[in-house]
Image: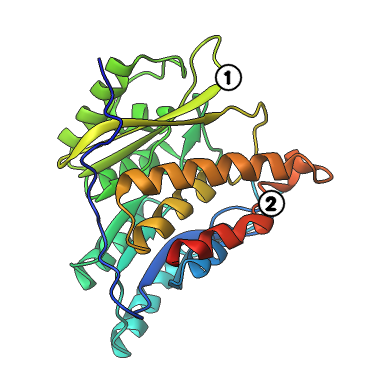
Amino acid sequence: MSIAQSPNAPVLFQREGDYIPRVAAVHDLCGYGKCSLGVAIPVLSAAGADVCPVPTGIFSSHTAFPGWYMHDTTSILQDYLDAWRKIDVQIDAVYSGFLGAPEQVDIIREIYDMFPQALRVVDPVMADHGKVYPTYTPELCDAMAALASDADVLTPNLTEAAIILGEQWHGTNISDDEARRIIDALIGKGAKNVVLKGIQRDGEDQIRNFVGGVDCDLFEVHNTFVPYMLHGTGDLYCSCLLAALLAGKDLYEAAWFAGGLTADAIVVSTKQPSFQDRGVSFEPLIGRVAALLQ
């Protein structure tokens, strides 16, 4: 199978003049170990977007640290949205990630109803390398899988794609044809565009992401694989992808930009003390996000 090198990739947001797009970022807030809102806010802000957080939970640190604390914010979110209605909030994109409870999917659907023209970006943060994250129950995984069907852009890794499709995870060594099958199956469930992340084949030193959509040719982007597991790289990738889309780039350009910056951020991270605990270090590269507007 041949993957298109100059694909018919859609422009999903028309940036006009000096207008600043507004993003409802439905993520958790993590105190230590960079991820979630701690990544989304600076990255999207650098791309000239106004980030409006909808916090799904508050964590003392990411969950790889021992003894982490989580506060589930589900009980406050309805009042939160009701207050937004009273002040005529305007939103151009809804970007969701880590969720704290199945009921939060209903909150996201309510945000969709409030802003029906907004771009819907779903990063189904719930698992990786065949393992579900410790705070995720089967009910929450099912709710996240249902939310995936509403996405204009869905960005699962291979484990998350398997959960959404109700399939077994078979590792990261998959063929082009299998990547196409998975993307087609996710589109069949309702997602309009899919970025399938984390394909790594035996004997290769590259990490591959495949992208396809209802009106988008299938294509592949790749970067040199850096052999470290760092927290927050998925959040950085999706935030960079959305940053590029909100800057008016097409999905092909956005996927290349997100992959390249994330790979370079991993290299930057390896030069920091305790880097495998601290999370991905992207701060020295933030100027590249701002340059999207030039």
Please report the residue visible at 64 percent of the width from the left and 33 percent of the height from the top: 229
Where is residue 55? Give x, y as percent: 49, 66
Label 2: which secondary element: loop
Q: Tell me which numbered mark, 2 or 1, is placed earlier along the sequence.
A: 2
Give the quadrant of residue 109. bottom left
Q: Residue at x 54, y 55 (%)?
A: 36
Which residue position holds label 1?
A: 205
Residue nearest the viewer, comparing 94 with 260: 260
**Image quarter hosting the C terminus:** bottom left
Give residue 177's mark.
none
Q: Is residue 283 above or below residue 184?
A: below
Identify the residue at image location x=41%, y=27%. Answer: 158
As drawn, is 35 to the left or to the right of 258? right
Name the image quarter holding residue 221.
Answer: top left
Q: Is residue 211 left or right of residue 287?
A: left
Instruction: Please say if the residues under marks 2 and 1 sit with CB atoms less than 8 Å apart.
Output: no
Q: Residue at x 75, y 39 (%)?
A: 270
Give amino acid for label 2: Gly
For the N terminus, the image quarter is top left
Q: CA distance from mark 2 to mark 1?
A: 27 Å
Identity, as a three-letter code, of the amino acid under mark 1: Asp
> Farthest residue in the bottom direction?
87
- Front-most of residues 64 and 221: 221
Residue bearing the label numbered 2: 33
Between circles 2 and 1, the one closer to the viewer is: 1
- Image height of 57 relative to 52, above or below: above
